[in-house]
Image (cartoon, rainbow, N blue to C red):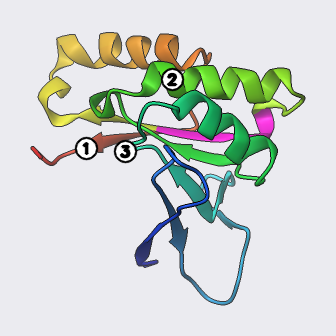
Amino acid sequence: MCPWILLYVASFPGAVCMYIAMGQGEQDHFVLKSGHAIPSIGLGTWRAGSDTAHSVQTAITEAGYRHVDTAAQYGVEKEVGKGLKAAMEAGINRKDLFVTSKLWCTDLVPNKVRPALQNTLKDLQLEYLDLYLVRNQKH
């Protein structure tokens, strides 16, 4: 098991936090059982603030982030989507990004899952997510 350590980053106003997976030695990614790789450093967008699109684009294009973590419940997915789009227009390939979002526990019923995912994809301006987690906390 890899513990997650939350670090606050002041250099990207609006992009409030990053998380680092601490494992055996330093690694830039972890290989999942499926064979897919997940970057070990991710840009968190919870409480991202008013300049989210620019912060996401800057984090990707200038700081080298390749994992972006968000959720519809955070209220910033449209802005995150603008930042992702701008980064891709600047030359970052979609296949080089790892985008995570979350299905909130309130949408965890059969008739809400697909619409929640479709709304997330629309807001993020993406055709697919790399990881879609079920968020099981009420706060």
Q: Relative to 10, is 26 above or below?
A: below
Q: Which residue is mark 1?
A: 135
State the separation of the CA atoms marked 2 and 1.
Answer: 21 Å
Q: Which residue is mark 2?
A: 79
Q: Quadrant of residue 42?
A: bottom right
Look at the numbered disc 3 and give the secondary structure of its residue. loop
Residue type (three-letter) at the residue carrying disc 1: Arg
Look at the numbered disc 1 and give the secondary structure of its residue. strand
Look at the numbered disc 2 and give the secondary structure of its residue. helix
Residue range in magenta is 95-100
Q: Residues within 10 Å of mark 3 (few under 14, many from 20)?
A: many
State the separation of the CA atoms marked 3 and 2.
Answer: 12 Å
Residue at 53% across, 48% down: 13
Q: Is residue 68 left or right of 6 when viewed as pictured?
A: right
Q: Earlier in the sequence, mark 3 or mark 1?
A: 3
Q: Nearer the viewer, mark 2 or mark 1?
A: 2
Quadrant containing the N terminus in the rendered view: bottom left
